[in-house]
Image: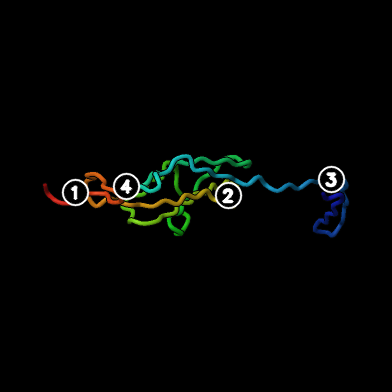
Amino acid sequence: PIDALTLSDVFYEQATATGTIMVTAPTLPDTQITGQPDDPSSSASATFTFVGSSGNGAFTFECQLDGGTFTGCSSPQVYDNLAEGSHTFAVRAVDAARNVDPTPATYTWMVQVAPGEFVGSCGDYTVYRTGPE
């Protein structure tokens, strides 16, 4: 807390005010992912839903895929034409004062697009139809 404050005007005349001024840290935004693709996923598309909270009123979201740049987004966020392999999605809330969620919500999943129509499995093997019958 600040107990006294001395102010000066343009003529260097000073005045002292006494009292207590409490400075509190802002409540930082928080983000949660509420919907995501299965892991593993057989789809090359992914849809995410998310929510946030902030002690400083209105907020927006920024999304990131696979370590790229955070860019403005909204829920739901959809990604198409994803390559097979591991992917990581991150989302963070940003409040009106530009305070950013220090711990973005993240989700990592594997895209495993099947090579063809699933036929069945035999022991440790999975059988897919890849050509004409």
Mark with earlier residue (1, 2): 2
Side (left or right) of 69 relative to 9: left
- Residue at the location (35% across, 52% down)? 111
- Nearest to viewer (mark 1 / mark 2): 1
Q: Secondary structure at mark 3?
A: strand
Which residue is farthest front? 123
Mark carried by residue 20: 3
- Residue at the location (83% across, 50% down)? 2
Mark with earlier residue (1, 4): 4
Q: Are marks 4 and 3 in contact (CB under 8 Å)?
A: no
| Residue type indicated by callout 3 | Thr
Q: Which residue is mark 1?
A: 129
The Cα–Cα distance between marks 2 and 4, rounded to whole angstroms, is 30 Å
Tag 2: Cα neighbours inside 10 Å, few (<14), some, or many (≥20)?
A: many
The Cα–Cα distance between marks 1 and 2, rounded to whole angstroms, is 46 Å
The x, y position of residue 86, in whole percent, is: 40, 56
